[in-house]
Amino acid sequence: MIIKSATFVISNSQVRKCPDSRLPEYAFIGRSNVGKSSLINMLTGKKGLAMTSQKPGKTQLINHFLINEAWHLVDLPGYGYARLSKDGREGLKRMIEDYVLEREQLVSLFVLLDCRHEPQKIDLEFVSWLGEHGVPFALVFTKTDKLSKGRLAANVEVYKAKLLEQWEELPPLFVTSSEERLGREELLDYIDSINHTLQ
C-alpha cells in the first residue's frame, strides 16, 4: 500500500463523538512510551502527524487520522501510565474500553510491545481481555533496532511461548523499527489485505 494522504481528523474523549463514517478503523495501543506515535508517523510517512514525546502518557485522547481518504488510523491512549491520578487512570481505562467494545468501525487493534522487555503482566492481561471479548488484534513489537537479531528472535519466541500457554493459536505478529522503517510494508500490506476483504 502506498500512503498518498494522511490527515488529522479529530481528537475526543468519548466514543460517541468519533467520526460519523462507515470507513474501517485500525487502532494502535500499548503501554505508555512503547513508541506508538513514532510508529504511526513512520507508517504514514509524516513525521509530525502523531505527537511524540520523551515523557510517557502524552496521548490521552482518541485521535483519528484519515488515510488515503479510505480508512481511519486511530491513536489510542497508552495504558498503565502510573503518574496519572487514580481517577485519571480509570478515566483513560473507560475511554479505551468504550472505544474497543463499542466502535463498530474498528476492524483490528494493533497492540504494541517493546521488544526489549520480557512479557509484561499488564500487556498479557490486556490481550486476554481482548480475547474474552472477541476483539480482533495483532501484536506489533517495537524498537527492534535496539537489540541484536539473535536477542530479538529469542525475545519474540519467549513471548510466543507465553501466549501459547493461554491461546490455541497466535495472533498476527509484526516486528518494527520506526528508526529503520522496518515492518512498514508488512503492516500496511496487512491493513490493505483486510480492506480488500471488506469491499
Image (cartoon, rainbow, N blue to C red):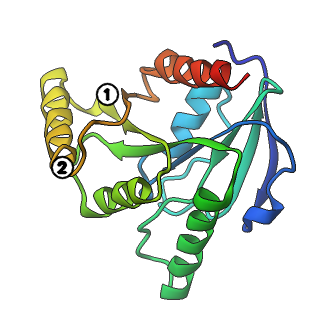
Rendering quarter of residue 171: top left
User: Residue at the location (43% across, 21% down)?
Assistant: 183
Position of 84 with respect to 66 (left or right) is left
Mark seen at residue 145: 1
Mark seen at residue 26: none
Measured Cα–Cα span from mark 2 to mark 1: 16 Å
Q: Say which of 98 and 186 sits in front.
A: 98
Q: Say which of 69 and 181 sits in front.
A: 69
Q: Which SS class for mark 2?
A: loop
Give the residue at mark 2. 118
Q: Position of residue 130 (x, y in %)?
A: 43, 55
Position of 42 with respect to 147 (left or right) is right
User: Residue at the location (20% across, 30% down)?
Assistant: 152
User: Residue at the location (40% across, 28% down)?
Assistant: 177
Q: Amino acid at mark 2?
A: Glu
Rate crowding at label 2 as few (under 14), some (14 to 19) or many (20 or more) other CA atoms within 10 Å.
few
Q: Which SS class for mark 1?
A: helix
